Amino acid sequence: MTDRAGLDAYILQCQASGFSRRQVEEALLRSGWVREDFAQALERAYGQEDKSTFAKTPRKMSYETVVAAQVQEHMPLTLAAGPWPVRKILVEECSQTYAPIQPAWRWVRGIGLAFLLVLFIIGSLLSAAAIGWLGPLALLLLMGPLMLAEALETWKVLDTYRFSLQPTHVFVRSGAINAHYHLLPYENIQDAQMDQGLLERVFGVASVVVSTPASEARIPFLKIEDAKRFQQDVLSRARMHKHMAE
């Protein structure tokens, strides 16, 4: 993925997570980008800027302050069009996690892989009976990449799922091939709920769902005590940040 594509993805993720245009713009400026490099990406994500509304928006010490501090600590600032320091922040955040995902989650993910294998076997038998060996071959070419991707996701799920409490937001990363990032600002968090479905009750674990007006993130298969502690920590930080913003 190119730096420019990564920049577009980062701005869209920030917009979906509830960060304001001003927060994203100042974070990028402090990170070494020049305004001309990201102006079009901001317009695609936020639309045409309303100067009068933008000028009246109160400035808050939020995500851009954290980005600026960590970038200065970990990476020299340049005005070239190349480096994307925000990616360094994501790498740093991905190296830590609040609590481990329980190994049973890998077996649950394996159910999807087993279902694909069953479909492949049945489809191969039916197509072989209908048109000969070309049927299974075509099915292998069609379903092979999908099964390999699902196998890799299942195998690496415990190593790639990371979530943590950052100074201004909840950070969640998932996915081995297509990584998904959630940055949920505390001041925008509406709720953090514990959830126990049938499989979670069977394995004696729980999930936590953190939601904002723009998005939500689910942290699956935690120990009950870890899930309760994480839920309480998220809600207490959300209350504190909302109180500070008033």
Image (cartoon, grey):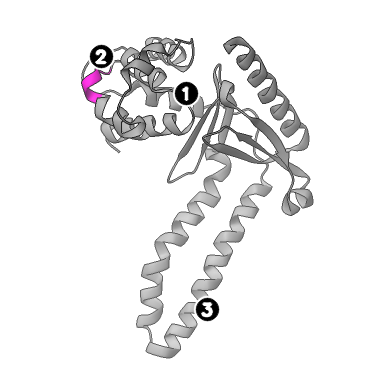
Report if residue 121 lies within the magenta region. Answer: no
Tell me the element at label 2: loop
Residue 129's x, y, as percent? 45, 89
Q: Camera-side residue: 27 or 199? A: 27
Question: Which residue, as the protein is rendered here, is positioned at the far bottom?
Answer: 130
| Rendered view: 77 above or below 223 | above
In this figure, which residue is indicated by the disc labeled 2? 78
Residue closer to the observer: 230 or 16: 16
**How many callouts does the rendering have?**
3
The answer to whether any part of residue 228 appears in the image is: yes
Left or right placement of residue 242 versus residue 20 in this view: right
> Is the residue marked by circle 1 packed among few (<14), some (14-19), or many (20+) residues within 10 Å?
few
Where 141 sits versus 184, above or below?
A: below
Instruction: Please give the name of the residue rendered at 77% of the width and 32% of the height, measured from the top-left corner.
Output: 225
- Circle 1 is placed at which residue position? 92
Which amino acid, mark 3? Ile
Report x, y in % for residue 144: 41, 65
Pointer 3 residue: 122
